[in-house]
Amino acid sequence: MGKSKNISSKSYGVSVSLCGIFGMLGIHHFYIGNWLHGFFDLLLLIFGLVLFSSSEQPQEAIGAILLMIDAVHTVLVFYKLIVENQKDGDGKLIVYYRDENS
């Protein structure tokens, strides 16, 4: 009984799909209830793209670094979702199989 209290009601499939398709936008964080994390991801992407598209060398390099940080972060969160080690906004684990009887 105690274990089911730590299981999120968020869909594993939706979470993994959103992270895999829209990962760098942070949409998966909005879905699972990690709003601040989602805004941070979105801002990383926006600032990274704006700076990367700049014609000046220092800003372009900083933009590339921000985009790489966002990409690496997305891969890490995607991995945590796949191995069922990612928590939602309420601190509950997002898992593939939820036993509805317990």
Image (spheres, rainbow, N blue to C red):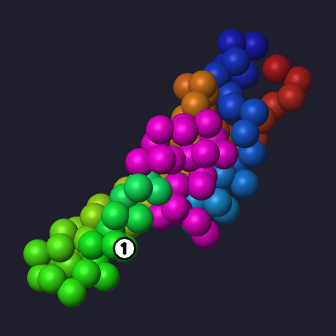
Residue for point 61% across, 69% down: 21
Q: Position of residue 36 (x, y in %)?
A: 47, 38
Q: Residues within 10 Å of mark 1 (few under 14, many from 20)?
A: some
Tag 1's secondary structure?
A: helix
Q: What is the quadrant of the C terminus in the image?
A: top right
Q: Is residue 99 left or right of residue 8?
A: right
**Residue 2 is at least partly visible in this image:** yes
Q: Is residue 56 above or below residue 26?
A: below
Q: Of 63 and 34, which appears nearest the observer?
A: 63
Q: Quadrant of residue 94?
A: top right
* Quadrant where the image shows the N terminus: top right
The answer to whether residue 82 is magenta is: no
Tell which residue pokes out farthest to the bottom in this image: 55
Q: Is residue 62 left or right of residue 8?
A: left
In front here: 72 or 5? 72
The residue sitting at the right extreme is: 101
| Residue 95 left/right relative to 84 | right
Q: Residue at x 15, y 83 (%)?
A: 56
Q: Is residue 75 visible?
A: no
Quarter of image, res 70: bottom left
* Picture layout, residue 90 above or below residue 65: above
**For the view shown, which residue lies furthest in the left direction?**
58
Tell me where residue 53 appears, x and y as whole percent.
31, 82
Q: Is residue 33 magenta?
A: yes
User: Which of 18 and 96 lies nearest the eye of the viewer?
Assistant: 18
Residue at 36%, 73% in the rendered image: 49
Q: Which residue is mark 1?
A: 49
Q: Please tell me whether the stretch drawn in magenta is mainly helix, strand or loop.
A: helix
Q: Which residues are magenta?
A: 21-40
Q: Label 1 sits on what residue type?
A: Leu
